[in-house]
Image (cartoon, rainbow, N blue to C red):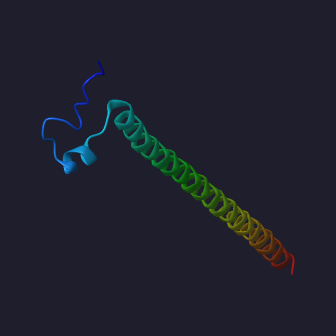
């Protein structure tokens, strides 16, 4: 005696037979969807890290350029102060 086939007997329609899926196949399909979701999450995190690294790089470049500008400004102020001091010192002895 064979075991009964519940997917085909008792007046089940063809549509119901085609839509019916067993638990292992459903589990595999659900796991595929979960894997795709996980891959999308990893992709999002990777893109976010790349964006943060790029932003940090450009912040560093800006800070470096700003430091160079400030150093040039300080050197100019020092040279102006030295020139002014020399110029006024030269007029004192004339």
> Which quarter of the image is occupied by the C terminus?
bottom right
The picture places residue 31, in percent across and down from the top left corner, at: 42, 37
Tell me the quarter of the picture where residue 32 sits: top left
For the residue pair 86 and 47, the one nearer the viewer reads as: 47
The picture places residue 16, in percent across and down from the top left corner, at: 20, 45
> Which quarter of the image is occupied by the N terminus?
top left
- Given the current orientation, which residue lies at the most extreme front position? 1
The picture places residue 49, in percent across and down from the top left corner, at: 56, 49
- Given the current orientation, which residue lies at the most extreme left position? 11
- The total of numbered circles placed on residues is 0
For the residue pair 51 and 30, the one nearer the viewer reads as: 30
Tell me the quarter of the picture where residue 26 sits: top left
Q: In the picture shown, does residue 62 fall above or below 4?
A: below
Q: Which residue is located at x 60 percent, y 54 percent? A: 56
Tell me the quarter of the picture where residue 61 sits: bottom right
Left or right of 51 on screen, residue 86: right
Q: In the picture shown, does residue 8 fall above or below 92?
A: above
Q: Which residue is located at x 21 percent, y 49 percent? A: 14
For the residue pair 49 and 43, the one nearer the viewer reads as: 43
For the residue pair 69 and 1, the one nearer the viewer reads as: 1
The picture places residue 41, in percent across and down from the top left corner, at: 46, 45
Q: Which residue is located at x 63 percent, y 63 percent? A: 62
């Amino acid at each position: 005696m064979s075991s009964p086939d519940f997917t085909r007997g008792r007046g089940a329609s063809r549509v119901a037979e085609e839509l019916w899926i067993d638990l292992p196949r459903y589990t595999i399909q659900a796991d595929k969807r979960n894997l795709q979701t996980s891959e999308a999450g990893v992709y999002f995190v990777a893109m976010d890290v790349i964006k943060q690294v790029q932003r940090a790089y450009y912040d560093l470049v800006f800070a470096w350029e700003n430091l160079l500008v400030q150093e040039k400004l300080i050197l100019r102020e020092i040279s102006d102060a030295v020139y002014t001091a020399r110029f006024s010192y030269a007029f004192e002895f004339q």
